[in-house]
Image: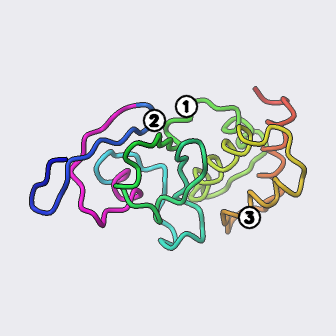
Amino acid sequence: MFCLQGKSLVTINVNNDDHELLIRPSDILLDTLRDQLGLTGAKPGCQNGDCGACTVLVDGWPVKSCLMLTAEAVGKKITTVEGLKDAPIQKAFIEQFAFQCGYCTSGFLMVCYALANIHPNPEDIVIDEWLQSNICRCTSYEEIGTAIRSVLAGKIK
């Protein structure tokens, strides 16, 4: 590991691409994604892990990137909303009107995408629990729940 003025050269994998970056030990993943890689889908909301607007996937699991140090991402596979491409959950959000202002949408997309991959046949209570990890101030969670349920039921491909 190369060090320069308190920064270390690290490689992190984001959306299946390796990126060499100079980081400080205190750099958080959210800022690194936005400021160094130009991936602005993860949003800075509360900055304390409550709202979920900054959610990304780390080895397939949803993680609030405002709470993760960039150094912790070394050796892990990071997926941002930009890496989902044309995932069915995106189409479902559009068809079900599951967003309004859009600020929280990327975080919800990441949680729903992970849920569909980790629990392909979840009970309603599991879906509701997963959706509680994010906050939307504009729309009801009913449309978001309908969107994920339509993907899980195979209605949207």
Query: Where on the picture, by quarter, is residue 69?
Result: bottom left
Coordinates of residue 90 in the picture (x, y in percent): 66, 38
| Residue nearest the viewer, comparing 84 with 58 | 58
Residue drawn at (76%, 39%) of the image: 95
The crowding category of the residue bearing disc 1, from other C-alpha atoms within 10 Å (few below 14, some 14 to 19, many at least 20), is few
109 lies above or below 117 = below
Q: Which residue is mark 1?
A: 85
Residue drawn at (83%, 55%) of the image: 126
Look at the numbered discs 1 and 3 and tell me whether their residues touch, using CB distance below 8 Å.
Answer: no
Look at the numbered discs 2 and 3 and tell me whether their residues touch, using CB distance below 8 Å.
Answer: no
From the viewer's perspective, is the residue at label 2 or at label 1 nearer? 2
Q: Which residue is mark 2?
A: 15
Q: Is residue 14 magenta?
A: no
Q: Earlier in the sequence, mark 1 or mark 3?
A: 1
33 lies above or below 103 = above
Identify which amino acid the numbered label 1 is placed on.
Lys
Q: Is residue 29 magenta?
A: yes
Q: Determine whether, in the image, residue 26 is placed left or right of residue 124.
A: left
From the viewer's perspective, is the residue at label 1 or at label 3 nearer? 3
Coordinates of residue 111 in the picture (x, y in percent): 66, 50
What span is in magenta? 17-34
Q: Which residue is mark 3?
A: 132
Colour mapping used in the image: rainbow
Identify which amino acid the numbered label 3 is placed on.
Gln
Identify which amino acid the numbered label 2 is placed on.
Asn
Look at the numbered discs 2 and 1 and tell me whether their residues touch, using CB distance below 8 Å.
Answer: no
Distance, label 2 to label 1, CA atoms, is 10 Å
